[in-house]
Amino acid sequence: MKGRQKNILVIEKSSTFSQLLRQTLHAGGFRSLRTIPQFPSLPKNRKAFDKVDAIVIGSNSNDSTATTAFLQRLSHSHGHIPTILVTDQKTEHDHQDNGQKQHFLSWSEFSRLPRLLHQLLDKSADTPVSKPNDTPIRILFVDDSYSVRFAYQKLLQENGYAVDVAKNAIEALQLARNNTYDLAIVDYYLPDTNGDKLCALLKPLDKQGYLQIALLTATYRDDVIKSALESGAIECMFKNEAKELFLARIASLARHVAAQKGLLESKQELLHVLQSVHDVILGIDQQNKVAFFNKHAKKVIGENTRLLGTPIKKLISFYRKAPKSSQLQSLDCDKPDNLVQQDNLVCAFNTDPDTLYDCNITRIDKNNERVEYLLILR
C-alpha cells in the first residue's frame, strides 16, 4: 500500500483471538496496530480517531448487545471508518445493506482479512493481492467408450482442466489411489460395475475431503439418477445435452471445489497459529470428539492423557455461571451449537473438577472437515 502504514484498531477480549488477528494482520502488511479488550468510547470529535484507518471486531465481542450499540454509535459519529466483524455467523447487527461501511468475515475465512482491508482502504490504488490458485482442476473421467473418453477429454482440456481417463472401474480406482482428483465424472453403465457402485468406492479414496462426483449417462431413468445420488454423486449430467450446459455444470462444481480448498487452507493456517498461543485450545469434530489440541493443552491436561478421538464429555464438564453469583448451572455438551451462544461459560476438567476455567466455543467451519469447533480455555 502506498503512503503511511495503516492503523487497525482491534477489539477482541480473548487474548487467543487477539494474537491470531494480530499475526494475520502483520502478515498482511499492517504493522501499526492497537488492540483493546472492550468497546471504546466514541467522542464526537473525529480528530480523536484520525489515526484509526479501520476497526476489526473479533467474535468474542460479537456475542452481546454491546456490539449493536457500538456499531450504531460508530455509524453516527465515525461512519467513515470501515469496520470488519470476524464472526461465527451474521447476527441482528448486520448493517451491510444500509449503506454503512460494515463487513462480515467468518472465522473459517479469517486469512482473507488483510486482503479485505486492502480492498477497503486502498480501492483506488493498484494494491497487490494474492492471486487465486493457478493449479487447474483435476478431473477423473470414466467411460468404456474410447470415442466418448477422447471427445470429453479434449473438450475439458481445451477449457483449462487437467483430465485423466479410465475405461472401467478397476482403472478408475487405481488412478484414484495414486492421484488426487477434484472432480470425478462417471458413466453409469460400465463393463465391470455400475456407476453408482463406483461412486461409493471412490468416496473413501478422497484424500483431501472435497472430491465432487458427477454421474454421466445417456438415460433419463429416475431409478438410475436416484441410485447414483444416493451413492455419493452430487450432479447428474446427460451425454446428449449441449456442450455449453455440460461446461457450465463443470464450472459450477469447480467453483465449489475451489471454495472447499480455500476453507481447508484457511483452517490449516488457523490451527498452525493456535499452536503458538498459551491458552488451552481443543478442536472438536462433528462427532463431538477431540480432533485437534495445541501444545499448551497437552501440558495442562497431562502428557499421558489421550486426547485425539476422545469424546469431549469424557474430558470436560460445562457450566453457566450465574451473573453476580457463585452458582453454576450444568450444561449439555452434546450440542456444541448451544454452547457457542452461551455467556458466562465456564468448564472444568473431569480429572480436576474443582478448578474452573473461563471458556469460549467458536464455530470455525460448516463443511465436512474434521475440526468444526474451537474450545478455548483461560
Image (spheres, rainbow, N blue to C red):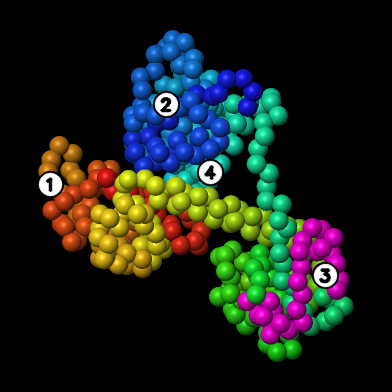
Where does label 2 land, which residue? 34
Amino acid type, label 1: Gln
Residue 224: x %, y % from top left: 67, 80
- Element carrying mark 4: helix
Marks 3 and 4, how far apart at CA? 37 Å
Sequence-first disc among 4 and 2: 2
| Residue at 34% over, 38% down | 15
Is 32 left or right of 66, judged from the image as shown?
right
- Comparing 368 with 171, the one in front is 171
Please give the range of residues in magenta.
150-177
Amino acid type, label 3: Tyr
For mark 4, does the 10 Å Cα neighbourhood hold few (<14), some (14 to 19), or many (20 or more) residues? many
Marks 3 and 1, how far apart at CA? 67 Å
For mark 1, does the 10 Å Cα neighbourhood hold few (<14), some (14 to 19), or many (20 or more) residues? few
Q: In the image as oriented, which residue stretches furthest toward the bottom?
A: 192
Where does label 3 land, which residue? 152
Amino acid type, label 2: Arg
- Element carrying mark 1: loop
For mark 3, does the 10 Å Cα neighbourhood hold few (<14), some (14 to 19), or many (20 or more) residues? some
Q: The N terminus is located in which quarter?
A: top right
Residue 43: x %, y % from top left: 39, 13
